[in-house]
Amino acid sequence: MDKNAKGIELLQQGKVEEAVQIFTEAIEENPTDPVGYINFGNVLMSVGDPEKAKRFFERAMEVDPEAGAAYYSLGTLHFNQGDYDHAKDQFERAITKGMENADVHFMLGMSLSQLDQPKLALPYFQRSVELDDQDVEAFFQLGLSLAKVEAYKEAIAAFNNVLSLDPEHADAYYNLGVANLVHESNTDQALAFFHKAIELQPDHELAQMGVATVDMIKKEESE
């Protein structure tokens, strides 16, 4: 096992100081390899030192401008700080540098979603679930983006995919309720989904509001 792999293993075990030592040795032994800088930056980010982490990611880019993982990590840093515009830029660069996995597409989609650009986020969430069809959160975010652009039929399919992977996902039931109410005008089905969300999460305020909305609609229809 090389030192970078060993350092990652130590980090996963919560042995941060030992991981730092290993990554330091990896950088000293091979200063032209961007991986050591990226790993060290990720450690610094995980322990709450984003400014130093940023310098290591930028150093990795200097050593190898094609190191997609460096742009991805810097994008994650910006995202965690709420700087979604710069995060978006870095995730886009990671993809142009050849990074092609579910995570980078998901994070780019999340950045665009946070920037209130659901239409632009859609293809990245779609690509994310293509690359990892077991990712519950990616399917859920795909469903949210589809609903925001009023593609309710496709949104319903995405939320059903969420439930096939996680049958106790209260927010998926709530959003299915909304989609059925808005798109299908099916108050009975919507009510059933809202009640299921509340069953799974009794303090789900949005689902409670959904129930109240359906009750009001039914009352108006009966008058």
Image: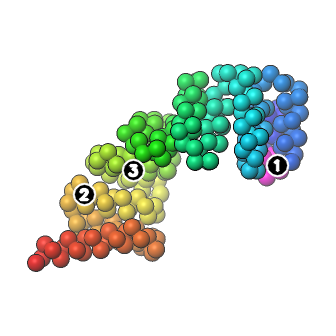
Left or right: residue 49 compared with residue 76: right
Q: Which residues are magenta?
A: 10-15
**Residue visible at 67% across and 31% down in the picture:** 70
Residue furthest out toward the left: 223
Element under label 2?
Answer: helix
Decide: few, some or many residues near mark 3? Use Cα within 10 Å; few <14, some 14-19, many ≥20. many
Give percent across and percent down for residue 127. 45, 35
Query: Mark 1 or mark 3: which comes first in sequence?
Result: 1
Q: 210 and 139: which one is in front?
A: 210
Q: 63 and 50: which one is in front?
A: 50
Decide: few, some or many residues near mark 2? Use Cα within 10 Å; few <14, some 14-19, many ≥20. some
Image height of 101 relative to 50, above or below: above
Q: Are marks 1 and 3 in contact (CB under 8 Å)?
A: no
From this viewpoint, is residue 12 visible? no
Q: Quadrant of residue 45?
A: top right
Distance (Cα) linking label 2 and label 3 = 14 Å
Element under label 3?
Answer: helix
**Residue visible at 58% across and 33% down in the picture:** 90
Quadrant holding the C terminus: bottom left
Image height of 110 relative to 165, above or below: above
Q: Which residue is mark 2?
A: 182
**Residue visible at 55% across and 32% down in the picture:** 89
Q: Which residue is mark 1?
A: 16
Image height of 61 relative to 7, above or below: above
Distance (Cα) linking label 1 and label 3 = 37 Å
Q: Amino acid at mark 3?
A: Leu
Q: Which residue is mark 3?
A: 144
From this viewpoint, is residue 216 visible? yes
Give percent across and percent down for residue 52. 77, 40
Element under label 1?
Answer: helix
The label on residue 79 is none
Q: Amino acid at mark 1?
A: Val
